[in-house]
Image: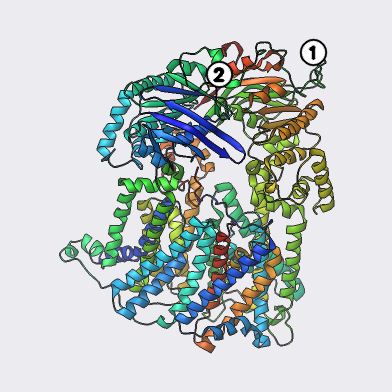
Amino acid sequence: MEVSVHNLTKTFGTLRANDRISLHFAGGQIHGVLGENGAGKSTLMKLLSGFLRPDGGEILLDSTPVALGEPGAALRAGVGMVHQEPLDVPGFSALENLLCAAPRWALPTRIEARNTLIVLAGRLGFSIAPDDPISALTVGQRQQLEIIRLLACGARTLILDEPTTGISAAQARSLFAALRRLAAEGNTVLFVSHKLDEVAAICNTVSVLRAGQVVGEGQVPMPQPQERLLNMMFGGGADHTNPVETPRRGVSTTTNPVETPRRGVSTTVPAWQIEGISARDGNMVLAGLDLSIPAGAVVGLAGLEGSGQQILLRLLCGQLRPSAGQLRLAGVDMAGATSATFRQGGVEYLPADRLVKGLVGPLTLAEHFALLQPGGAIINRHGAEVKARAAITGYNIKATPDSPILSLSGGNQQRAMLAMIPDNTRALVCEQPTRGLDVASARAIWGRLMARRDAGCAVVFATADLDEILDYSDYVLVFFAGRVSQMLPRAELSAYRLAELIGGVGFDAVNGRAKANPQ
Amino acid sequence: MIAHDQATPTISEGHTRRSALLIAALALVGALIFTSLVLLSSNVPPLAAYNLIFLGTFSTPTRISDMVMLASPLLLCSCGLTLTFAAGLYNLGIEGQMALGAVAAMIPLRLLPNLPPPLLWVLAFACGAAGGAMWALLVAGLRIRLQVNEIFAGLGLNFLASGIALYLVLGPWRRIGRASSSGTEPLPTDVWLPTFGTLRVAPAAPVIALIILVLIWFAVTRTRWGLELRAVGLNPQAAGRMGIPATRRLAESLAACGALAGIAGAIQVLAVFHQLIPSISSGIGLLALLVVLLIQANPAWVLPIAAAFAIFTTGSLQMSVALGADSSIAGVLQGALVLFALLARGLSGRR
Amino acid sequence: MEQILITLAAVLATAAPLIFATMGETISERAGVVNLSLDGSMLLAAMAGFAVARVSGSLALGFAAAALVGCLVALILGVLSLSLGQSQTAVGFVLALLCTDLSSFLGTPYVRKPGPAVPHAPLPGLSDIPILGPLLFSHDMLIYASFLLLPTVWWFLYHTRAGLVLRALGERPQTAYARGVPVIRLRYLYLLIGGALVGIAGAAYSLDLKQGWSYRHTFGTGWIALAIVIFGGWHPWRVAIGCYLFAALQSLASRSQSVLPSIPTQVFQVAPFVLMIVVLALINLLASPGTAHRLATLPKPLRRPAERFVGWLATPAPAALGQPFQRP
């Protein structure tokens, strides 16, 4: 089955997630789609699988234009998508998941469905028993079940979105074998990934997306030199091999970056000390992590979203309790502490979902400041308003003290969240500090964060934006496919090297002992 | 248990005045049309019925007193529910809290009948508040410790509380000599709350209710505690991030609501029925829920709507005598008002 | 022996309305919609069913009217919550109160009036079987229908494709949506089916078990039905056990009345409700995390069966129950 897109465009507000994308995926091949976080890969796949409707352009299946209004339509047209977190029903068995909402012509009876499951699983080298409950299957097996289901329901194009996140190496191997087999039988496979070695291993062609657009001449046949792919993904320049010369916005250019003393780095207790920590968050487990995060430093967590950064961030602000190991905050052992204790110890948490976890939407800016007042039973309206006005001028927030927070733009909400951080904060945990913000707001936010850092506060942040990591971090931690690197000083890291590491190239050299693994 | 759905009514903030009034108007019109249709289908002349419902209360001073004595506990319960709705809870257990408050208020009245009445009143109110608060804390405990949805905990405890009241009325506290199931021995008249002239109204009741109203309004709009409650109701995660002890606030709001319901129960015992009867709460708690659902827990509107509902109910009591129709038409009007308000809100896109 | 059989048969009969109501609510809640208006819609349907049957003389019309009323109330709940985004709890609760008052008001002309009743219909031949005869086959059509409803609902939920989709609607509607299932439309359908069954449950009182119409005729049974659905873990057989248990408690209560004549009737009327709630609370206690800890300290041979028992008792609610469905 041939899949083509012509000038496909999708816009979310002011963000062009997909900008006039034209690609052609021939049948019977495995096509890789590369790109960093936020490049537009997910949007493209959602458009192809019917979860989103395009704002412009068209999709053609076997040279026929189709309008895929909703996922059911896409499946009927023969396109099926396997999500990173497979969409199944938790309380069901494998067989029931197969049967649920499957068309009659595909699986007429339960007996036939059982046979189909066994036959297809055997043919593809998967090991799933029909009566296993979903809760007992690993992510890899659930993925396999999804693939079987899609094939049984007549999909001839399979889209896999970062399929090897969260599965073991052995399962990845059997997945690849299955995909090669499927391609050989005439199916089309779209393989979305950020892992260069895997794309090199199985893909016949590769297309690279960056900032919503196709890079270069579009689809190129594999094999391709890694360097070229990395350039296409991250946009290299001539000086990408020289680490020190990459300009850093956080440091003055007149001094040697490596030697600039940071106030409080070597003289005070590290902000966090982590020894042998193991923690689990849903499906992911982080084990054996040893880390020492100095005060007055910015640490960036790089890597594909969902590779374990979230666990570390939640550990650092006390939202997750470790199952083993020790965590010390400024020298104080935090065993058994709640997030409230962390807060009292000076750790503030800035979530990515501002309106879901960070701010109370319908309340006004002044009311937020009123809530943060140290004491007093009566609301000090005047004091809160004064603080709100100070925040508005100091942080350049476009709002009035009586504006409800949800009426503010994302950038202003972020500024407001920053403005609410008490002065004596000694550590900041930020999930994606500049997500969805325009350049000016992002710069302003970082100006503030840098000021905090200079005053001795430690800042740990995760982001999808590589440039942000490169521009502002003092140290970088890379998360890749279940492994966590050592803490790498930024000064020793070039943009190119970082891109390599995120793609998994040469990771062993910097591998720490910790592992982040799905369970 | 049932996952808590997001659309709990909370104190509305960014409403534009005009759209809120529009919604109110739509609700009123819709409810009146609906109720009129119901009246017509039973061959009851609507205008005569509305005359009773809206104006019937004011026809005699006795009826006005009855209205006031209904409005006072209704106001108290509505104030309490304002707190729990602010915190994002559906406290359907308020009937049980009121009943148990009434039972608790009886305790000092029965144990220490020889104390001077003013002291007894203070004790009765204090015990009533404590009893209601304790019953509400059971709901809080079930929700926080055992993850039992407060709706079902509340409903279940309502049954339990009515069972306790029934047991007491028919068992240990029953009237000696008379095999009566209608209530305990009536309290001696000097323990009754003093009335106004020859009327049945005890001014203490509305006075207490109004004082509480002001306190609640103040707590919700002016104190840190009230603001924290609202934050917890709107977004418990963000509230926790900002240092607010969310579960504690939930429990506190339930306890406060229970206490107010208990005081309402004490009023029922001291000033309305002068005894403990099996259905001491008389559906006032449920009516208060309707009040709060209608006004989306906005403290400014509690008094007018509670008073209006009390007027409707009292007025309609004459229905059967005057028009041969059942007095539950007031309940139809009240329910229809809330239903059409929900409809209007839904149509206007507001949650 | 004869007496015991008669008593048991009576329990099976009195539980019939509860069976209808709880089966309807189970269907609705498994699809993700909680219908809190049960008590009110049962009353309104009972009144409507009785009124129509009395006026028309036809039982069939009466039951049809009751089912229709149940459907209409469910439809209002559906429109306001599924389509207009209002809280299912708030709407359901208001409807419960509104329908109760509507039934009182509209039903006044019918209070204590005679009307048709479902005729006793012992099955020829079968009702002569020694023990099972009087127990199972000497009832009327409505009771037989309740016997048949139970396995039907169970079969539908667990052995049909449509039932599979229904359960997915309540557990993870996003998955159903991704597979092309019209989530909202199906939720409406199952809500309406549940409403119709609830309506029939109401008529089961006024046209059969508690023949006639009076104020608060069904006496709070709707609220207990909601509790029984939870108690039964949203599984038809366990819910049915809850229904029969409650009916047995009611029977026990009325028996005790004759043994303890000094205690007035109201106590016996209220006692089953109270006991049911206590049982529910105990179940919840057993299912709580605290118990899991205590169980872990039991000696090995006892632990596995104990944990399995508690696990069986503590079925969690359908994960998406009560939550509005957002397209992913």
Which corner quadrant of the image does residue B13 belong to?
bottom right
Crowd around label 2: few <14 · some 14–19 · many ≥20 (10 Å): many
Left or right of residue C295: residue A416:
right
Image quadrant containing the N terminus of chain C: bottom left
Determine whether B269 is above or below C322 in the image.
below
Label 1 is found on which chain of the structure? Answer: A
Residue type at tag 1: Asn
Residues under labels 1 and 2: Cα distance? 29 Å
Label 2 is found on which chain of the structure? Answer: A
Q: Which residue is pictured at 74% across the width and 86% down the height?
A: B197
Q: Report if residue B282 is visible in the image.
A: no
Q: Report if residue B175 is visible in the image.
A: yes
Residue type at tag 2: Gly
Q: How is the image coloured?
A: rainbow
Q: Which residue is pictured at 39% across the width and 41% down the height?
A: A73
Disc number placed over residue A256 in the picture, else none: 1
Which corner quadrant of the image does residue A238 belong to?
top right
Q: Secondary structure at mark 1?
A: loop
Q: Which residue is mark 2?
A: A503
Q: Position of residue B238 (x, y in %)?
A: 67, 43
